[in-house]
Image: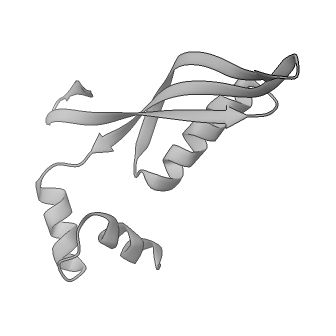
């Protein structure tokens, strides 16, 4: 699922991915865990939307809080990744991001 937003100079495109965060303490912490993890692995995260809450029960008590969250990140124009890849010796995708981070 992608979302389009108009801008004066063209269109901005966002890719939406679904993640599930978990916590032993609260739904709020489960949402934070989902968004935090997404920002560690995705570039240019812009927004999130909580889609569903659920949890696990063990020994007559809540053992885990779960939050299903849609996280949106900016999809770069076609030209931008090629330019960055050329500047990094032809690396693309995950390899280029690792190169940027010095890994």
Q: Quadrant of the N terminus?
A: top left
In this rendered view, identify the residue nearer to me: 65 or 14.
65
Q: Position of residue 44 (x, y in %)?
A: 40, 47
Q: Look at the image and name its color scheme.
A: one colour
30 on left or right of 36: right
57 on left or right of 93: right
Q: Position of residue 53 (x, y in %)?
A: 61, 17
45 on left or right of 6: right
Outermost bottom residue: 89
In this rendered view, identify the residue nearer to me: 36 or 59.
59
Q: Position of residue 72 (x, y in %)?
A: 39, 34
Residue plotted at (22% across, 26% down): 4
Residue plotted at (56% across, 47% down): 37
Count of numbered marks: 0
Residue plotted at (59% across, 44% down): 36
| Image quadrant in which you'd find residue 6 | top left
- The correct choice, above or below, for 53 with respect to 72 in the image is above
| Image quadrant in which you'd find residue 10 | top left
Outermost front residue: 59
- The correct choice, above or below, for 10 with respect to 91 in the image is above
Residue plotted at (29% across, 35% down): 14
């Amino acid at each position: 699922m992608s979302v389009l937003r108009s801008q004066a100079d063209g269109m901005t495109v966002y890719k939406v991915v679904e993640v599930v965060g978990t916590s032993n303490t609260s739904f709020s912490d489960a949402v934070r865990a989902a968004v935090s993890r997404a920002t560690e692995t995705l570039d240019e995260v812009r927004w999130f939307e909580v889609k569903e809450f659920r949890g696990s029960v063990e020994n007559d008590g809540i053992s885990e809080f779960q939050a299903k969250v849609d996280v949106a990140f900016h999809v770069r124009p076609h030209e931008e990744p090629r330019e960055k890849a050329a500047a990094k010796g032809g690396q693309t995708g995950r390899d280029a991001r690792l190169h940027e981070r010095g890994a």
